[in-house]
Amino acid sequence: MTDKQITVQKKTAKYKSKRRVSRELVLQGLYQWRLTGETESAIASQLRETQIFSRADEAFFSRLLSGVLTHVDQLEQAIQPYLDRSLKELSPVEYSILLLSTYELVHFLDIPYRAIINEAIELARIYGGSDGYKYVNGVLDKLAYKLRTTETA
């Protein structure tokens, strides 16, 4: 994470919803997992020690982080058909956002798919490359139509 991203995160953290903060923390955890291969418990422990964790929804955070890391293979299989390259070629940020959002689309049916996509776009704008949010949006939009057929009809 760059100094600019840390500054933006600190300045806006007090105005973010608990779920947004949780998603940001999970994104950081997935990024760390992708780059280092650390265990879920080690990552969760480190994230819980951050200052911003007090602003998170702990149950939502735990369910997301654990769920994504438990179901990585299934999530990757769901995402791959909608990519124009392999998952390994994605930036770690885009990869992590797609895993996180796909997990939400599958397991959090109480959250509207548009809200999940909007959250993913915002995360990609803040933490991803310059046009990464467009890519994330395109993939998740197609995926939502497959996973949430009743809601997208």
Image (cartoon, grey):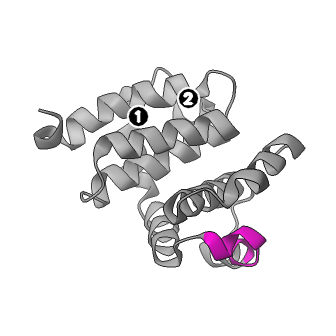
Across and down, in percent, residue 110 comes to: 25, 59
With respect to residue 82, does 79 lie above or below?
below
| Image-based side of 60 in relation to 129, left or right | left
* Residue visible at 18% across and 35% down in the picture: 152
Q: Amino acid at mark 1?
A: Gln
**Closest to the observer: 30 or 18?**
18
| Image-based side of 42 in relation to 96, left or right | right
The residue beneath circle 2 is 133
Across and down, in percent, residue 148 comes to: 20, 43
Total tally of numbered discs in the picture: 2
**Label annotation for residue 50:** none
- Our reading of the magenta stretch's main secondary structure is helix
In which quadrant of the rendered image does the C terminus lie?
top left
Across and down, in percent, residue 124 comes to: 60, 36
* Residue visible at 61% across and 54% down in the picture: 27
Task: Give SS at disc 1.
Answer: helix
Task: Give SS at disc 2.
Answer: helix
Q: Nearer the viewer, mark 1 or mark 2?
A: 2
Q: Amino acid at mark 2?
A: Tyr
With respect to residue 77, does 34 lie above or below?
below
Q: Residue furthest front?
A: 15
Q: Quadrant of residue 26?
A: bottom right
The residue beneath circle 1 is 80
Separation of residues labelled 1 and 2 (CA atoms): 17 Å
Q: Earlier in the sequence, mark 1 or mark 2?
A: 1
* Residue visible at 41% across and 29% down in the picture: 139
Residue 77 in view here: no
**Magenta-colored span:** 46-55
* Residue visible at 46% across and 60% down in the picture: 68
**Closest to the observer: 120 or 29?**
120
Across and down, in percent, residue 88 comes to: 59, 36
